[in-house]
Image (cartoon, helix red, strand yellow):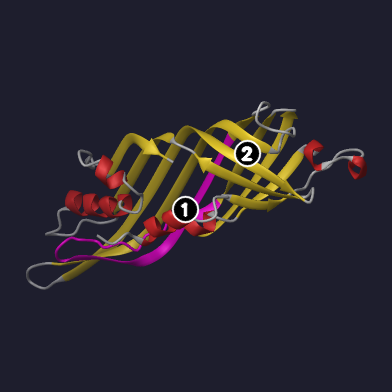
Amino acid sequence: MKLSTFKLKLVFAVTGIFALSVFFVNAQTSDSLHKTAKEFKNTIKLNVTSRILYDKAFMLGYERVINKHQSLNIFGGVQEFPLNGAFRLSNANVADVKKKSGYSFGADYRFYLSNENKYNAPRGIYLAPFVSFYQFSSDRTLTHTDTAGTIRSTNLNTRINFLNVGGELGYQFILWKRLVIDAVMFGPAVTNYKFKARLQADIPGLDENEALQEFIDALKEKLPLLDELTKEEGVNRSGTEAFWSVGF
C-alpha cells in the first residue's frame, strides 16, 4: 500500500533533520551587550517544519525563562489541513476545495535538566508537559449521479478539532547568541479527535450517513495509524465522529 502524501511528509519530518523549529532569538535585557546568550530571557520562534506537515502554515512561538531551569513556551498560528484523498463511494464525487482554513495554539512548560545541561535555560535538554488545540475547516462540492443519470450537487462542509494533552522531550541549541534550533524529539499525547461533516441539502438516492462516514474516513487516513486505531468508531446522526486516541 502506498503511503499518502501526508504520511510521507510526516516520515520526512521525523526522520530527516530532527529539529522541529528553526528561529531567530529576540532576547533583551537591561544590559544585553554584556550578557551571554544563556542569560537571555525572551525568545521569539518561527516554526519552519509546520510547512512540511500542513498547507500554507505560518506558526510562531514565544518562550519566557522563568528561572535557571524552567521556562514557559507558547505557540500558535494558521495552517490548512492537507486533503486530496480518494472518496470511495459509488456514483458520488467530491470536488476540489472551495474554501479552507485552520489554526492552532498551545503551550508547554519546560524543565531544563540541571544534571544534564552545562548551561541554564533556555539551552539544553528539556522535558515538558504540553497542551495544544487544532481546528481545520473546509467547504467543497459533493456531486451524485443517480441510476437515471440525473446529476445533483450540494455543499459539503467539514470541521476537524484536535485537543492534545501530553509530554515532550527536546533539546534546544543556541548558536551565535541570537539563533536557536529547538528540536522536539519525542512528543506522545492523548488526543480528543472530533470530525464533523454536513451536507447543505439532501440528495435523493444518496445515503447521507454513508457519504459522511466515507469522507471522514478519508480525513482519518491522512493521520498515520489513526484509521487502524478507530475501526469501531462511526458517525452519529448529526454527522459527527468523536473519540479519544493516541496522538503525537
Which kind of residue does numbered mark 2 sit on?
Ile
Does residue 54 appear in the picture of this structure? no
Give the amino acid type for the residue marked by disc 1 in the picture.
Thr
Marks 2/1: CA–CA distance: 25 Å
Residue 39 placement (x, y as % from top left): 81, 36
Give the residue drawn at x 38%, y 49%.
159
Say which mark, if any, is on residue 224: none
Q: Which residue is drawn at 59% across and 45% down?
A: 183
Whether tag 2 and tag 1 are in contact, CB under 8 A, the answer is no
Main secondary-structure element of the magenta-colored stretch: strand
Give residue 54's position: percent from left, percent from top: 47, 56
Secondary structure of residue under mark 1: helix
Is 84 located above or below residue 213 in the figure?
below
> Does residue 90 show up magenta in the picture?
yes
- View extreme (left): residue: 147
Q: Position of residue 147 (x, y in %)?
A: 7, 68
Circle 1 Cα neighbour tier, 10 Å, few/some/many (<14 / 14–19 / ≥20): few
Query: With 177 as the anchor, is 80 left or right in this view?
Result: left
Determine whether, in the image, residue 149 is placed left or right of residue 39.
left
What is the magenta range? Answer: 78-107
Is 41 magenta? The answer is no
Counting every numbered tag in the picture gives 2
Q: Can residue 88 be seen in this view?
A: yes
Residue tagged by mark 1? 15
Quarter the N terminus occupies: bottom left
Which one is earlier in the sequence, the residue at label 2 or at label 1?
1
Name the foreground residue: 174 vs 132.
174
For mark 2, give the secondary structure: strand
- Residue 74 numbered mark, or none: 2
Q: Residue at x 43, y 54 (%)?
A: 10
- Residue 15 at x, y percent in the picture: 47, 53
Residue drawn at the location 52% of the way across and 49% of the way down:
103
